[in-house]
Image (cartoon, rainbow, N blue to C red):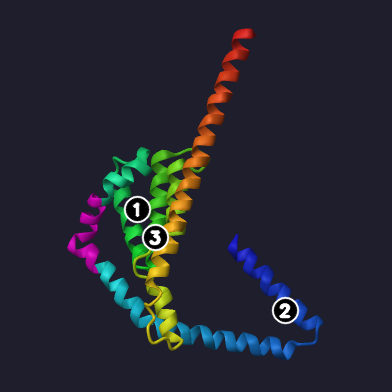
């Protein structure tokens, strides 16, 4: 879906640049954007490697498993139908740990594996409540150390790239609480709707 969105935006920008006679500015913007992307990636490479290494150490040392065990009581409440699957809970906790460290690039592949495993365990044609909850948590992503944002700030010359920590803590906590509140509300609404449908179906069978 996002590929189509980006292709559409690029196509519109190209057509509008040609129609407005600003092809030179368009080509200059493309060139400058490419150079800027490479410079940005090189400038944040070091700090991203550092925290990715920390994640690898956590995994290899067994600390990731210990973190998973610490999170298990909380995860069992949110992911009831996969709460007995150790591998799924470990993937979920690893994803949440990566998000806590602000490592979105490390959290994404772990999150995809967790989502695939949940889909296999629960099955069904529609997304399960557990999968929706996981996606909301992954998207809101409570962060303790905003590594990626801090790296970008440092690349643009910020002397204190981590001075945004209090704002990040407050905003990410509010976002994840709001996301979970929405999940539980709509889950409750869905269950209530299913119960009403069952009652109506039962009444219609009796009257029929």
Residue labelled with disc 3: 142
On the rendered image, what quadrant is the N terminus found in?
A: bottom right
Mark 1 or 2: the one toward you: 1
Spatial CA span between label 1 and label 2: 41 Å
Segment tinted magenta in the rendering: 57-70
Residue labelled with disc 2: 14
- Numbered circles on residues, count: 3
Circle 3 residues within 10 Å: few <14, some 14–19, many ≥20:
many
Quadrant of the rendered structure where residue 91 is? bottom left
Q: Earlier in the sequence, mark 1 or mark 2?
A: 2
**SS for dot 2:** helix
Q: Residue at x 34, y 82 (%)?
A: 46
Residue labelled with disc 1: 92
Q: Is residue 139 above or below residue 41?
A: above
Q: Residue at x 72, y 78 (%)?
A: 14
Q: Residue at x 53, y 30 (%)?
A: 192
Spatial CA span between label 3 and label 2: 38 Å
Q: Position of residue 159 (x, y in %)?
A: 38, 87
On the rendered image, what quadrant is the C terminus found in?
A: top right
Q: Is residue 179 above or below residue 142?
A: above
Q: Nearer the viewer, residue 118 or 69?
A: 69
Circle 2 residues within 10 Å: few <14, some 14–19, many ≥20:
some
For the residues labelled 3 and 1, say whether their Cβ atoms are less than 8 Å apart.
no
């Amino acid at each position: 879906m996002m590929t189509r969105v980006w292709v559409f935006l690029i196509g519109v920008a190209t057509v509008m640049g040609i129609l407005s006679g600003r092809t030179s500015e368009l080509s200059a913007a493309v060139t400058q954007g490419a150079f800027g992307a490479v410079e940005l990636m090189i400038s944040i490479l070091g700090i991203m490697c550092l925290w990715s290494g920390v994640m690898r150490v956590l995994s290899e040392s067994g600390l990731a498993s210990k973190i998973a065990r610490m999170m298990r009581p909380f995860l069992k409440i949110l992911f009831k139908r996969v709460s007995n699957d150790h591998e799924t809970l470990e993937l979920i906790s690893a994803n949440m740990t990566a998000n806590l460290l602000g490592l979105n690039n490390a959290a994404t592949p772990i999150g995809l594996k967790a989502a695939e495993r949940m889909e296999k365990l629960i099955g069904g044609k529609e997304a399960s409540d557990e999968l929706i909850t996981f996606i909301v948590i992954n998207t809101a992503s409570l962060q303790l150390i905003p590594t990626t944002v801090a790296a970008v700030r440092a690349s643009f010359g910020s002397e204190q790239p981590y001075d945004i920590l209090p704002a990040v803590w407050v905003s990410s906590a509010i976002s994840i609480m709001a996301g979970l509140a929405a999940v539980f509300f709509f889950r409750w609404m869905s269950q209530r709707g299913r119960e009403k449908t069952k009652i109506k179906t039962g009444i219609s069978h009796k009257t029929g």
